[in-house]
Amino acid sequence: MANSDLQTIIGQIQEAASDLRSEAVSHRMQRVTNTVASELRGGILGINAILDDSVSNKELGTVFDLWSPSPLNAMRANLARAYGVMESVPGTSGTTALNVPAVITLAREGEEIGICRDAHISIPAAIVLSGARPSYIEPLYDEELGILLPPTAGEVDEFLTAHPRVKALWLTLPTYYGVQGDIDGIVQVCREHGVRIAIDEAHGPHLKLLGGLSFPRSAEAAGADLITQSTHKVMSALNQGSIIHFNDSELLRRYEEMQSLGFVSTSFSFLILSSIEHAVNQMLTCGKEIWAPAVRLARRLRTAAAAMPGVRVLDESAVDGARVTGIDPTRVTLNVAGTGISGFDIEERIFRMGGVTEMATPEVVLFLVSPGISRTQIDATIEALQYALHNAPGCVQAQLFAPPPIPRRVMTPRQATMHSRRERVRVRNAVGRVSAETISCYPPGQAIVVAGEEISKEAVDYLSRAVSAGAHLKRVRDDNFRTWEVVCEYE
């Protein structure tokens, strides 16, 4: 490693240390830089060893003590103030590690929890651990856009009326595609039914902090009881940096109990924690300044794509005030079913041109435009998209990939996963049997069949088509999807 490279890295570490609000962390990082030069000569493992020295520091506080005075709890107070919530707890193992104890906090064994079926795969996993009984809201599949849309407040009202024993409702808002539902109306409906409302806001940690830039309303502003969000996905936190927010003191108390059961590592990373603090501070000080160009560049990409044959663009015309109240302007969602080329093939062609997509499905290609992206990069993306669509058949009958109806639940996910004997059968023989595994189709990742549900022919056909189109199945032990693990005896 050249001396110039060493000096650059040291300078970056020093700059990061000076940006940290937490005095104890800043002091520790400054001490690290005093010796890092010599360690760097030992290679990347040397710097990691030195930085990791900042992990165990009693003077900084701990995520297992949310009340004693400490720099970490001062940081928590700052986060809560920034987001306008009662309490905030940062996490260093990703939002999955927050979702699981959050679900167990909301509904314990035998209790009923309402879940929109487009939930992240961590939610069915959490249900297995909690022993709760899930009831599902089926999101609307938009045939023109090829994506799932959130439920309306009216549909939530109907669901809660039909399921009076539901203790809490779990929704994912905004969706992966940046679609925001009627968050205020849904929160109000839950209040009327006496049901707690939890929002997986993994794709919206920036919304509350970017008012005035045409971003949708946030779950924090609507007053949801519990909110999880992926600070690392959209903002500048290090990978696995996430936050859970509370507007309910009883839920916070229960969550404290849950996180001490092993869901949160005792070796949490202060580097990730400090990056969360830095990311939020960045949004508070110059968020609008750095995101405004991203909004403009996303509009440029969206406008160019809309002019391409066979491409349909998700834009503000989808906002109806009931099901869709806003769209993240930095997410560019393109339905390419009319081009005659699958989203997977378009993604591959763009990749060969040096471009990057966020996600593709058989029908859709999604781009994320974030701060730091230049006009040159956007124009290169437009060129790559044009190349990908070159000689596209066009004018074909779009093949719909609507998810199958939600299967009938025979037993709880916990019963099927942890209290049953299983056997593996050929997929064609699995129809009518009870699934012993939860299978999700990625992208975008929602569960198609949850453990404990009866396997339907529609589910088998959908998954087979998706695999043939290039999708990946998660939580499947047979990568070729030729067999399915089913329940043969329940204990």
Image (spheres, helix red, strand yellow):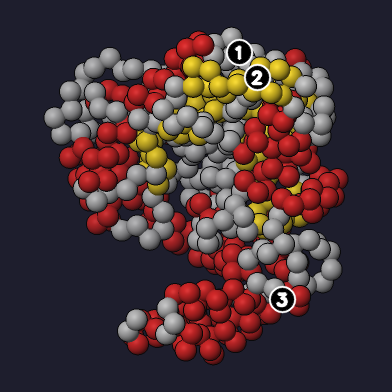
Q: Position of residue 309 (x, y in %)?
A: 21, 28
Classed neighbour count for the residue bearing mark 1: other residues with Cα under 10 Å, few (<14), some (14–19), many (≥20):
some
Pick whichever, 155 or 484, lies toward us. Answer: 484
* Quarter of the figure that contains the N terminus: bottom left
Residue ID for mark 1: 433
Q: Amino acid at mark 3?
A: Asn
319 displayed left or right of 487: left
Q: Amino acid at mark 1?
A: Arg
Looking at the rendered structure, the secondary structure element under dot 3 is loop
Q: Quadrant of residue 162?
A: top right
Q: Position of residue 469 (x, y in %)?
A: 34, 26
Classed neighbour count for the residue bearing mark 3: other residues with Cα under 10 Å, few (<14), some (14–19), many (≥20):
few
Badge nearest the viewer, 2 or 3: 2
Badge nearest the viewer, 3 or 1: 1
Classed neighbour count for the residue bearing mark 2: other residues with Cα under 10 Å, few (<14), some (14–19), many (≥20):
many
Q: Position of residue 5 (x, y in %)?
A: 35, 81
Residue ID for mark 3: 57
Residue ID for mark 2: 487
Q: Residue at (35%, 24%) from the top-left corner?
A: 468
The mark nearer the N terminus, 3 or 1, is 3
